[in-house]
Image (tube, rainbow, N blue to C red):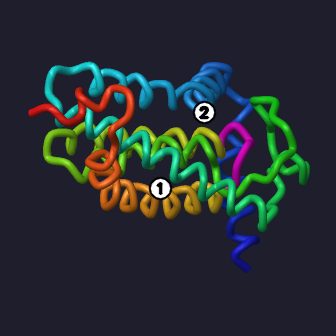
Amino acid sequence: MIEDINIALFKSINHLAGINPVLDYLGIITANYLPFIFILWLAYLGFRKERAGKKIALYAGFSAAIGLLFNLLITSVYYHPRPFTLHLATLLIQHTAETSFPSDHTTIMLSIAFLLIYYRETRLSGIVLSILGLVGGLARVFAGLHFPLDILGSIGVALTASLLAYSFGPKLIEAYSGPGHQILHRS
């Protein structure tokens, strides 16, 4: 039942692929390269003078790393084929036939975005990046790489990862005394 809904939703999105070259191009660019905007935003936060921005950028990096670790754990015990391996997709981007659940791209983007929402200083950018992350996940479905439930799974992973990073990131920073610790600890 759920898989039937997943496939029907996938087909309703992916059937638009391969029809309009401009839409295909936008879908490919969004699906492949949107995560770089998130990385650039973290770099921007990290290089600002405010110490809070540096810490928040670091926490967001923790969040993405935790999200990817969860994805690795999930994919080590659960396999779900990608749509193109089932011959259901108009495939716009070549990809290996590894497990599709959850989407690493979407997990990275949303783990970063959700973490930013927790802090007043970055809340607006977190909301904007959350919307972009959802668009990026949708683009991965449009391009034939993921099912909609892969994206929903990534949302759950990202929420969990960001909450853990928000809860434990400050404690990790406080305990850190390695290279560059002066930047993080000065007032």
Asked whether, in this view, residue 82 is left or right of residue 6, the answer is right
What whole-number distance in Å separates the C-alpha atoms at marks 1 and 2? Answer: 18 Å
Residue at image coords 26%, 38%: 55
Which numbered disc covers residue 145? none
**Residue assigned mark 1:** 158
Please, which residue is most extreme toward the bottom here? 1
**Residue assigned mark 2:** 31
Q: Residues within 10 Å of mark 2 (few under 14, many from 20)?
A: many
State the image quarter where residue 32 is shown: top right
| Quadrant of the rendering where the N terminus is positioned | bottom right
Q: Position of residue 11 (x, y in %)?
A: 73, 53
Residue at image coords 42%, 39%: 61
| Sooner in the amino-acid sequence: mark 1 or mark 2 | 2
Amino acid at circle 1: Ala
Image vertical order of residue 113 relative to residue 81, above or below: above
Is disc 2 placed on a helix, strand or loop?
A: helix
Amino acid at circle 2: Ala
Highlighted range, magenta:
142-147
